[in-house]
Image: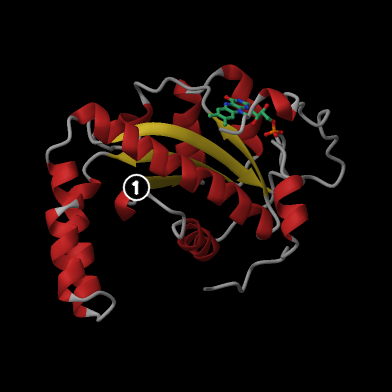
């Protein structure tokens, strides 16, 4: 696991001090190499049948940000203006089409034996090949949401903060970045950047009393 740029290895701080940041130091650029590393770390997230039905578009140019402003809600403009990048997460409803190649490669690399390969092809794969579109959308949204959370924590470990964003016109998200809207379903955007030194955090967001949200069964 590449950890060259992990600057915060304190689990408690990474997880429990995460909060949505909506204003970043706009002078901070994150290199494409670091993004590649963060996405690599993010995609160790679990996914349904290891389908990995996620797709990332990293918007870090002025041209890309101008596109975001065309379909994001106005209250999300400060994040667009100041973030180092807006990471757009899409569910990939065609992910199962690469599934055969992924597992065949794992077999050829000696990571799984022939029995496991046959099992994957006869159990998991048909589930997706015969799934209706709504199921593929739902599964890809679950996979991508897990990746989203992991990305936010990975970003913290790299010394950045984030704001997950759903306030945008979902009918425009894919086409705006030249993706097939039937295949790629918008799940979330995540603004990522460096919190300014003088950033005044909003009041720590409140949570329901824990007893209200769980039961033993
Ligand atoms: C799916 C999703 C969509 C969200 N959309 C927005 C948004 O459009 N704009 C925004 O400022 N925050 C947005 N948020 C951030 C939430 O308001 C925030 O996570 C919540 O209030 C809890 O605060 P915290 O992140 O600081 O813990 C979104 C969060 C999620 C998970």
Which residue sits furthest front? 217
Is label 1's Cβ within 8 Å of ligand 1? no
* Quadrant location, ligand no. 1: top right
Q: Is residue 14 above or below residue 76?
A: below
Frontmost residue, 126 versus 148: 126
Number of marks drawn? 1
Q: Is residue 117 left or right of residue 147?
A: left
Report if residue 107 is visible in the image: yes
Q: Is residue 20 above or below residue 121?
A: above
Q: Quadrant of residue 157?
A: bottom right
**Residue 192, x across and y down, in percent:** 61, 45
Q: Residue at x 36, y 46 (%)?
A: 55
Frontmost residue, 42 versus 217: 217
Local crowd size for mark 1, using a 10 Å CA cut-off: few (<14), some (14–19), many (≥20): few
Frontmost residue, 210 versus 163: 210
Frontmost residue, 150 versus 191: 150
Which residue sits furthest bottom? 110
Q: Is residue 93 left or right of residue 25?
A: left
What residue sits right under mark 1 in the picture? 48
Q: Is residue 89 left or right of residue 122?
A: right
Colour option used: secondary structure
Q: Residue at x 55, y 44 (%)?
A: 149
What element does badge 1 sit on?
Answer: helix
**Residue 63, x across and y down, in percent:** 46, 38
**Residue 48, x across and y down, in percent:** 34, 47
Q: Is residue 118 above or below residue 155?
A: below
**Residue 73, x across and y down, in percent:** 54, 19
Q: Residue at x 21, y 48 (%)?
A: 96
Q: Is residue 189 left or right of residue 110?
A: right
Report if residue 51 is visible in the image: no
Q: Residue at x 56, y 32 (%)?
A: 217
């Amino acid at each position: 696991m590449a950890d060259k740029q992990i600057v915060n290895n304190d689990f408690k701080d990474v997880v429990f001090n995460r909060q949505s940041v909506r204003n970043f130091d706009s002078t901070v650029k994150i290199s494409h190499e670091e993004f590649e590393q963060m996405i690599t770390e993010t995609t160790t997230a679990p996914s349904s049948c290891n389908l990995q039905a996620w797709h990332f578009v990293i918007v870090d140019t002025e041209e890309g940000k101008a596109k975001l402003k065309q379909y994001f809600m106005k209250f999300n403009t400060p994040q667009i203006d100041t973030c180092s990048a807006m990471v757009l997460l899409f569910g990939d409803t065609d992910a199962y089409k690469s599934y055969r190649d992924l597992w065949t490669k794992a077999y050829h690399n000696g990571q799984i034996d022939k029995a496991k390969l046959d099992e994957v092809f006869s159990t998991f794969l048909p589930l997706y090949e015969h799934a209706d579109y709504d199921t593929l959308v739902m599964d890809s949204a679950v996979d991508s949401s897990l990746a989203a959370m992991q990305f936010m924590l990975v970003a913290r470990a790299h010394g950045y903060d984030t704001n997950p964003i759903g306030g945008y016109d979902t009918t425009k998200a894919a086409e705006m970045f030249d993706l097939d809207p039937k295949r790629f379903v918008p799940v979330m955007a995540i603004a990522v950047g460096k919190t300014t030194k003088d950033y005044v955090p909003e009041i720590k967001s409140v949570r329901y009393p824990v007893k209200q949200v769980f039961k033993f069964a």
